Image (tube, rainbow, N blue to C red):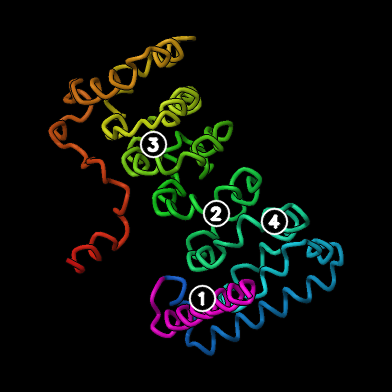
């Protein structure tokens, strides 16, 4: 039947995740895999973590009750992949059970991408507490988030200088929270802009500029706005017009103009850059229409090799 075939395919892919992890540990590829002295040491640590997790569940019947979720059985073919991350999952078991399972219906949207999540778990796990805090908003867009994970991870760490003295690593995301669903749902459009905006993050975080701009920029994205020049030259735009964002009604008035997208693109490319970038004024970001589509993957190399 179709269900058995799906189970077998998922189990096979899950086993492949396990074998790839063992291979990385054996060859000490990746920072997290160099912490194990051998594959045996890795297996011992995962086994110990598994025993601790089971012991914790048995001693906390309330957590066990969260497993009474109609979609829990879909986790069974993922067990080989889950076993590869028990040591990293251990501290998150409680929040996962209460916020993802527990009849929250999030597992239904997350399960199809669970193998990809576990494959990239070393990158995702440090940010899992924040993700779980906002799982209600993020879960429906799991596939999009994974598709653009490398662009998003550029924003995962914001140092004190970038956040203006705020030690919160998620200062950028916190300003976006009221509009998070809008941006996440439009990630195919927003994604290519993210690498270009990252160098300008410190000035974007000042004076709640992200919070002020988001309602209006979100409208542009929803209309399919794709020009990357504004993102690449955001420092120029904010240097000359950042003051206008602090005047009530001015941002709304500007973005309500029919020609505002074209005006933004024109100004981003034509405004003087010397006062902002100094000797780097003649340096521009690479921002053709394909930037962001495969910038951090081997997709382009694969295309070349097939020619």
| Mark 4 or 2, closer to the camera | 4
Q: Is residue 119 magenta?
A: no
Q: In the rendered structure, find residue 100 and report the number of the disc placed on it.
A: 4
The residues bearing labels 4 and 2 have C-alpha atoms spaced at a distance of 16 Å
Q: Position of residue 3 (x, y in %)?
A: 64, 72
Sequence-wise, the earlier of marks 3 and 1 is: 1
In this picture, is 26 found above or below 245? below
Q: CA distance from mark 2 to mark 1?
A: 25 Å
Q: Dot 2: few (<14), some (14–19), or many (≥20) neighbours within 10 Å? A: some
Q: Which residue is mark 3?
A: 201
Q: Secondary structure at mark 1?
A: helix
Please name which of the two marks, 3 or 1, marks the residue nearer to the observer. Answer: 1
Q: Earlier in the sequence, mark 4 or mark 3?
A: 4
In this rendering, the answer to whether 62 lies above or below 136 is below
* Callout 4 crowding tier (Cα within 10 Å): few <14, some 14–19, many ≥20: many
Is tag 3's residue or tag 2's residue first in the polypeptide sequence?
Answer: 2
- Work out whether residue 153 or residue 102 is closer to the camera in this orientation and state it: 102
Q: For the magenta stretch, what is the residue range?
A: 1-30
Residue 28 part of the magenta segment: yes
The structure residue drawn at horizontal position 39% and vertical position 39%, both measured from the top left corner, is: 189
Residue picked out by circle 1: 13
For mark 1, does the 10 Å Cα neighbourhood hold few (<14), some (14 to 19), or many (20 or more) residues? some
């Amino acid at each position: 039947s179709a269900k058995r075939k799906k189970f077998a395919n998922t189990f096979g892919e899950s086993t492949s995740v396990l074998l790839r992890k063992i291979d990385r540990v054996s060859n000490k590829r990746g920072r997290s895999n160099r912490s194990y002295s051998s594959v045996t040491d890795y297996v011992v640590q995962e086994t110990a973590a598994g025993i601790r997790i089971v012991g914790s569940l048995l001693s906390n019947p309330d957590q066990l009750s969260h497993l009474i979720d109609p979609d829990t059985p879909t986790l069974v073919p993922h067990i080989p992949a889950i076993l590869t991350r028990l040591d990293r999952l251990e501290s998150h078991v409680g929040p996962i059970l209460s916020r993802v399972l527990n009849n929250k219906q999030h597992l239904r949207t997350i399960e199809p991408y669970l193998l990809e999540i576990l494959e990239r778990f070393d990158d995702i796990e440090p940010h899992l507490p924040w993700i779980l805090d906002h799982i209600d908003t993020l879960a429906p867009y799991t596939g999009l988030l994974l598709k653009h994970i490398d662009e998003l991870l550029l924003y995962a760490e914001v140092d004190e200088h970038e956040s203006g003295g705020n030690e919160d690593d998620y200062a950028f995301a916190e300003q976006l929270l009221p509009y998070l669903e809008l941006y996440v749902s439009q990630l195919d459009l927003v994604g290519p802009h993210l690498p270009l905006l990252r160098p300008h993050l410190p000035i974007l975080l000042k004076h709640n500029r992200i919070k002020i701009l988001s309602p209006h920029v979100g409208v542009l994205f929803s209309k399919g706005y794709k020009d990357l020049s504004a993102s690449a030259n955001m420092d120029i735009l904010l240097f000359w017009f950042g003051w206008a964002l602090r005047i009530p009604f001015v941002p709304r008035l500007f973005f309500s103009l029919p020609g505002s997208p074209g005006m933004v693109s024109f100004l981003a490319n034509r405004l003087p850059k010397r006062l902002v970038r100094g000797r780097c004024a003649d340096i521009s970001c690479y921002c053709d229409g394909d930037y962001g589509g495969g910038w951090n993957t081997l997709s382009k190399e694969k295309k070349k090799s097939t020619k």
